[in-house]
Amino acid sequence: MGKLNSAIETLRDRGAPALCKAVLGLARTTAHRVTGRQFALCRVYDYRLWVDLNDRGISRTLMLFGERELEHKAMLERIVEPGMRIFDIGANIGYYAIMESQLVGPSGQVVAIEPSPGNVALLQRNLEQNAISNVVVREGAISDEEGKREFHLSTQSNLNTFHDIGSGAVHLAGESIPVEVNTVPALAEEFGPPDVMRMDVEGHEVEVIRGLLDAVEAGTMRPRIIFETHLSRYTAEHSFEPVLRRLFAAGYEVSLAASSWERGTEVVETFGYKGVEKIRSDGVIRTLFESISADDAVKLICETGGLRTVILSPSA
């Protein structure tokens, strides 16, 4: 009955083509498991990725559907140009790093940072699989200081986190590992300042951006920043608001943002904004909004929720 309900939900939310793709993906997954294989190769857009069949997160989604977070992909395509340098923070198994590699082209560079050893191994394997030479991998994490921090592993590899609070905590595996952490300015000393920073770091965007603020205010780097929000991981002790306020005071603005789902779209619309594009992804419809004011952005990101993916851009 559970599988039947899942099939009905997929048909309702994603349509018949997605259901057919999911059935084929599930059949392949089952066949691999019967033969004792942990990893499988799947088609994602115009490239192929190795995925971990034991992972209930991004690997499972890509094995079943071959895509995810299409609004995030569309937003990247709007801001990334050939020749750019991108810091991909929390690169996971390379879903975005390979996409970015294609967007920046041979004259550009992607620096992919990932703290999970298992993800790093798959990331490097996927770069080799697709003969990609303009992506450099660094095992470790980015924060607001140099040193080591405890990193909590999850049953869903894209939900590994430094912060064992919030809605994602239910998926934690009960295991943590020490990882080396560094700052964006320190990474820039090795590779040069980034044009774009992309991150989905499960609440650690607070620390990543905080570690960047001095350099932004000094004018030594002013990258565009695209990140996913994590409202349930922002608390009084771990507040994102002062970091955002300081970044806005330094001349940044929310140039583009995507709602979390239909209900999130309604929340953003109550602030008086009208969507510019609707994108169906992951079984929901997300809406893109342009030019959200600093005060409204703080409320939507830190208080009410409603935004999923945000681009912070230096003012022209």
Image (tube, rainbow, N blue to C red):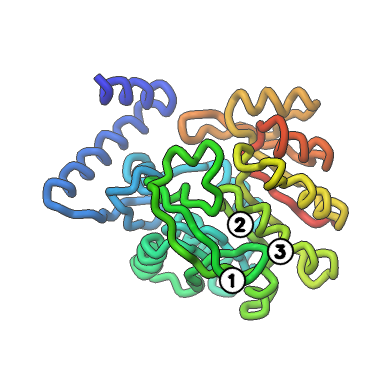
Q: Which mark is residue 48?
A: none
Q: Amino acid at mark 1?
A: Gly
Q: What residue is at 64 percent from the left and 60 percent from the top?
A: 197
Q: Is 99 on the left or on the right of 131, as rendered?
A: right
* x and y percentages locating residue 105 in the rendered image: 55, 68
Q: Is 202 on the left or on the right of 31, as rendered?
A: right
Badge nearest the viewer, 3 or 1: 1
Counting residues from the N terminus, which is met first, the one under dot 3 or under dot 1?
1
Residue 161 appears in view: yes
Q: Amino acid at mark 2?
A: Arg
The residue where tag 1 is placed is 147
Q: Look at the numbered disc 1 and give the secondary structure of its residue.
A: strand
Q: How many marks?
A: 3
User: Which quadrant of the view contains residue 176?
Assistant: bottom left
Q: Look at the numbered disc 3 and give the secondary structure of its residue.
A: loop
Q: Look at the numbered disc 2 and give the secondary structure of its residue.
A: strand
Placement of 10 over or under 237, stated as above or below: above
Badge nearest the viewer, 2 or 1: 1
Counting residues from the N terminus, which is met first, the one under dot 2 or under dot 1?
1
Q: Within 10 Å of the Cα at label 3, are there few (<14), some (14-19), or many (20+) other Cα atoms?
A: many
Residue 83 appears in view: no
Q: Amino acid at mark 3?
A: Gly
Image marks 3 and 1: residues in contact by CB distance under 8 Å = no
* x and y percentages locating residue 245 in the rendered image: 82, 48
Q: Within 10 Å of the Cα at label 2, are there few (<14), some (14-19), or many (20+) other Cα atoms?
A: many
Q: Which mark is residue 211?
A: 3
Counting residues from the N terminus, which is met first, the one under dot 3 or under dot 2?
2
> Mark 3 and mark 2: span between their CA atoms?
15 Å
Q: Nearer the viewer, residue 79 or 296?
A: 296
Q: Which mark is residue 198?
A: 2
> Mark 3 and mark 1: span between their CA atoms?
13 Å
